[in-house]
Image (spheres, grey):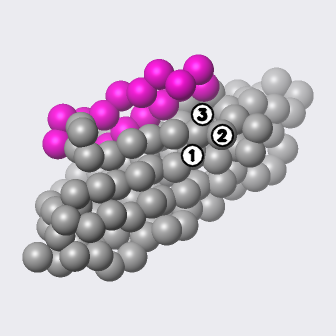
Amino acid sequence: VQLQASGGGLVQAGGSLRLTCAASGSISTIDRMAWYRQAPGKQRELAAEISRGGKTNYRDSVKGRFTISRANAKNTVDLQMNSLTPEDTAVYYCNADVIRSGGYWQPNVWGQGTQVTVSS
């Protein structure tokens, strides 16, 4: 199973970006999907997560600005980021708990990361 993230880039403060992550491989279903981020010199932190049923959870600093969504039929998860600030600058990683074909549980699968840079 692989997760491929895209959509990062350079944006000015106040701008928007949309990240997309697509899962591929021998997948039966995907349970939880999430976006984490890691700023230079800091630990990786959860930005947002979404259950298969659509229940969402956000870290406080992104509430009201970020929206996580998913398309179960496509095995994708998006992160719409609005009103970006320099503090949002980080490498963003997608993460998923996967049930592979045959029923094998593969939790905590990571994508390769995509850089988001917000200039002031």
* Residue 64 in view in this figure: yes
User: Marks 1 and 2: CB-CB under 8 Å?
Assistant: yes
Q: Outermost residue toward the right?
A: 102
Q: Earlier in the sequence, mark 2 or mark 3?
A: 2
Name the residue at 30% across, 51% down.
Answer: 44
In the picture of the structure, the residue carrying the numbered disc 3 is: 97
Q: Residues within 10 Å of mark 1 (few under 14, many from 20)?
A: many
Q: CA distance from mark 1 to mark 2?
A: 6 Å
Residue 82 place in picture, x, y as percent: 29, 55
* Residue 91 in view in this figure: no
Disc 2 element: strand
Q: Amino acid at mark 3?
A: Asp
- Disc number lying in front (1 or 3): 1
Q: The magenta stretch spans which residues? A: 47-61
Instruction: Name the mark on residue 77.
Output: 1
Q: Earlier in the sequence, mark 1 or mark 2?
A: 2
Q: Quadrant of the C terminus?
A: bottom left
Q: CA distance from mark 1 to mark 3?
A: 12 Å
Q: Amino acid at mark 1?
A: Val
In the picture, residue 38 is in which quadrant?
A: bottom left
In the picture of the structure, the residue carrying the numbered disc 2 is: 71
Residue 87 place in picture, x, y as percent: 15, 61
- Disc number lying in front (2 or 3): 2
* Nearer the observer, 39 or 75: 75
Q: Is residue 73 left or right of residue 33?
A: right
Disc 3 element: strand
